[in-house]
Amino acid sequence: MEVYLLRSTVSSLTLYPDHTHTPNPPIHCLRQSKRSSGPSPKKKDLSRILRTDAAVKNIERKANSNKYSNLWPKAVLEALDGAIANNLWETALKIFGLLRKQHWYEARCQTYTKLLVMLGKCRQPEQARLLFELMLTDGLKPTVDVYTALVGVYGKSGLLDKAFSTVDYMKSVSDCKPDVYTYSILINCCTKFRRYDLIEQILAEMSYLGIGCNTVIFNTLIDGYGKAEMFELMEDSLTNMIESGSCLPDVFTFNSFPWRLWESGQIDKMEKCAYGRAGDINKMGELFLVMEEKKCVPDHITFATMIQACNAQGMTAAAEDLKNRMITTDENLGRRLIGC
């Protein structure tokens, strides 16, 4: 494997940094003033993309040389951001190496966190390990965000043991305790690799630490269990979400839950799901209005579920109104489900 980072003097991954670092004030870049008139937004977007691409390639070429140590900060930082945004991990690491050569360079945890998140998306755990080592040699003390990003790299790469080990170490550091975002990433990785046997352990640990599930975690569980056709656990997750009192099901919940049942042919269960299952049609209607206000159009499975829930409660007028809304929203959709 080709390594794009300079190897540090650390021989292996060290999770016990003793370094402290006081960052210097950030570098401020001048912004161009907006013109009162100019090309259309589409042309501006295309122009910006072309300029960014050219800038990234230009900076990448300079990264292969040792003579560039006094480049304009704005050019280097924008090129790095562009490479990260497009998940060009080889290019990003080359530009980062160039950045570290600049006389104005100041090591920052935020930069390392962005790079680690990108490496997680690209499933590059070895590069992430080297990057973490490099961070320690830069004299930085890892933050919760850094460790959480590292958990994401290992988890998304299928190295769940290392992901769990990193979380375990975080629990021993006073100012780096794993938070709900850390656990949401861990749970998401477990569902992606179908390690549902580990989820109860994670939830128990969260409960012990006093960390409650948020909407993202509940939705991840509902979608993950649904894909695995573990419908009892999926329904339990939805019930826990509703009964928590702090996590109102959102658009994703309302679309995902019935869709998984529809996909598996569990049509009879659809009319029992969400608020309709509990007989709380008013709550279901409130959520539907919130979806409309946010311009989030329910899909055909959601419409079908709401119509069936209303019919099950004898609310034929409400069911008819939903049919009309469905037809108005999408005429083709209405033709497919007019028999609900």
Image (spheres, rainbow, N blue to C red):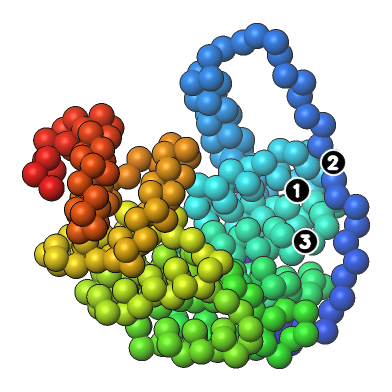
Single out the mark in the foreground, 2 or 1.
2
Q: Is residue 87 left or right of residue 167?
A: left
Up-down: is 210 above or below 80?
A: below
The percent position of residue 148, horizontal first and vertical second, equals 61, 72
Q: Is residue 321 left or right of residue 142?
A: left
Disc 3 on helix, strand or loop? loop
Q: Decide: marks 3, 2 in contact (CB < 8 A)?
A: no
The Cα–Cα distance between marks 3 and 2, rounded to whole angstroms, is: 15 Å
Disc 1 on helix, strand or loop? loop
Residue visible at 71% across and 90% down in the picture: 172
Estimate how packed mark 1 is, as few (under 14), some (14 to 19) or many (20 or more) residues with alpha carbons within 10 Å: few
Residue 139 vs residue 185, the one in the foreground: 185
Most distant residue in the top direction: 37
The percent position of residue 82, horizontal first and vertical second, equals 58, 43
The percent position of residue 122, horizontal first and vertical second, equals 46, 61
Q: Decide: marks 3, 1 in contact (CB < 8 A)?
A: no
Q: Which residue is mark 1?
A: 67
Q: Which residue is mark 2?
A: 28
- Give, as a three-letter code, the residue at label 3: Arg
Single out the mark in the foreground, 3 or 1.
3
The Cα–Cα distance between marks 3 and 1, rounded to whole angstroms, is: 23 Å
Residue 29 vs residue 61, the one in the foreground: 29
Q: Which residue is mark 3?
A: 108
Estimate how packed mark 2 is, as few (under 14), some (14 to 19) or many (20 or more) residues with alpha carbons within 10 Å: few
Q: Is residue 209 visible?
A: yes
- Give, as a three-letter code, the residue at label 1: Lys
Q: Quadrant of residue 335?
A: top left
Up-down: is 305 above or below 178?
A: above
Residue 287 vs residue 316, the one in the foreground: 316
